[in-house]
Image (cartoon, rainbow, N blue to C red):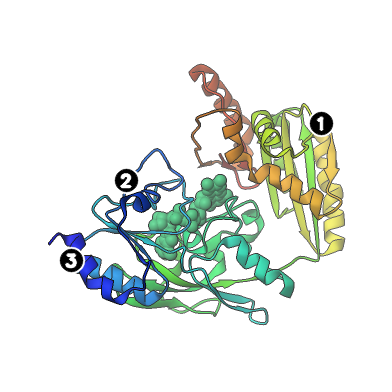
Amino acid sequence: MSRIESVLTRIEPHLPPGAIVTDENERKTYECDGLAVHRTVPALVIRVTSTAEVALTVGACHEFDVPFVARGSGTGLSGGAQPHAEGVLIVMSTMRDILDIDPLAQRAIVQPGVINLNLSNEANPGGYYFAPDPSSQSVCSIGGNVAENSGGAHCLKYGFTTNHVTGVTLVTARGDIVEIGGDAPEYPGYDLLGVLCGSEGTLGIVTEVTVRLTRLPEAVETLLIGFESTDAAGEAVSDIISAGIMPAAIEMMDALAIEAAEKAVACNYPEGAGAVLVVELDGPAIDVDLERETVIARAKDHGAGEIRVAVDNVERGLIWKGRKSAFAAVGRISPDYIVQDGVIPRSRLGPVLASISTIAEECGVRVANVFHAGDGTLH
Ligand SMILES: Cc1cc2nc3c(=O)[nH]c(=O)nc-3n(C[C@H](O)[C@H](O)[C@H](O)COP(=O)(O)OP(=O)(O)OC[C@H]3O[C@@H](n4cnc5c(N)ncnc54)[C@H](O)[C@@H]3O)c2cc1C
């Protein structure tokens, strides 16, 4: 009997119908994550629905020395959920229940397969949301967010996933179930949650997550500002932050990224702009009013063209749709592309963008720049 067959024999009697996937065509659908250039069909796929099923599967893998990989929604761009050809792929997207939302304690307990945006949608009526907002938030899972310590546009002000997780249930590589943290803000001892967030599934499989919920702000304003060049937009970003303003988000897109987004979602960005900034301000209404005036003044100092303040949620949604669709939108202007992530000091935005453009020209490739300008994260 092969090692995979031994695992199968051990777990099969304890799993519900449909949990075990052996059919080759079905297994093939899990051959890659967002890094589609690398593909491997897993030997076995298990769709789990509980901590006990994860512990059983991982315990059997440990016993028979079979490699295993956890998979959330498979949107990771670094190949973390890529399966092993002789291993088991443990699919967590079938664990997608929101177990508890407690507005009083500002906490929610979720299964790891819960889609990031679904948690906010559920918490919104009570006046709360889940702050980490990767651009993939309408499809990626909270378990994947924990494993990747994901961030997004609003992490400039609100921090990354690690700042919003207070406890997890974890199945270790031997199949033991352990609890780390809980619903209190901090626990004595080593910061194991800090180590776990961002460990890409290498320290165990998360089967339950307790997260902080953030109060919805009294006011939110979203500005779309057109500039002649990324240099001018970059300088405006530095100036806005040095004016003591901490926007919820400042995102920048260059001309090629704008062209792609426009073709994909008709987001109605300023025509002919060399760069746009999406600036979101939130907090008490009185602060947001003052901050908006400062942002507009600083943007004008750097030659801002069209300045648009979203008048309602529809307009705000369209502005963000342009930004959030930008990665996928590049597919509209090129049949093939790769995405690279990098972080630079935001004070060096101008020189780095100039270098990118020189290198792109020398190499004969087109580069679209979309980035979290507030914290210097380039894509
Ligand atoms: C269009 C697009 C935009 C994106 N934008 C952003 C962005 O703005 N910010 C950002 O940070 N990322 C972004 N990403 C990357 C990706 O969406 C995030 O890393 C996301 O958190 C991955 O979640 P997932 O559920 O898809 O995880 P998967 O891709 O399935 O897995 C990612 C890693 O997590 C591990 N894992 C999954 N579930 C568990 C679990 N329960 N326990 C332990 N380990 C687990 C996997 O083994 C793997 O190593 C983007 C991706 C795309 C395609």
Q: Residue 6 carries which label?
A: 3
CA distance separating discs 3 and 1:
68 Å
Asked if the residue at tag 1 contacts the one at tag 3, i.e. Cβ–Cβ closer than 8 Å, the answer is no
Q: Which mark is residue 40?
A: 2
Q: On the rendered image, what quadrant is the N terminus found in? A: bottom left
Q: What residue type is labelled 2?
A: Thr
In the rendered structure, the answer to whether residue 328 lies left or right of residue 215 reads left
Q: Residue 214 occupies which quadrant of the picture? A: bottom right
Which residue is rendered at x = 19% and y = 62% of the image? 5
Q: Is label 3 in a helix, a strand or a loop? A: helix
Asked if the residue at tag 3 contacts the one at tag 2, i.e. Cβ–Cβ closer than 8 Å, the answer is no
Q: Which mark is residue 303?
A: 1
Q: Is label 2 in a helix, a strand or a loop? A: loop
Q: Is residue 355 above or below residue 150?
A: above
Q: Residue 369 occupies which quadrant of the picture? A: top right
Asked if the residue at tag 1 contacts the one at tag 2, i.e. Cβ–Cβ closer than 8 Å, the answer is no
Q: Give percent across and percent down for residue 98.
A: 56, 73
CA distance separating discs 2 and 1:
50 Å
Q: Give percent across and percent down for residue 322.
A: 70, 42
Query: Which of these two is toward me, 37 or 172?
Result: 37
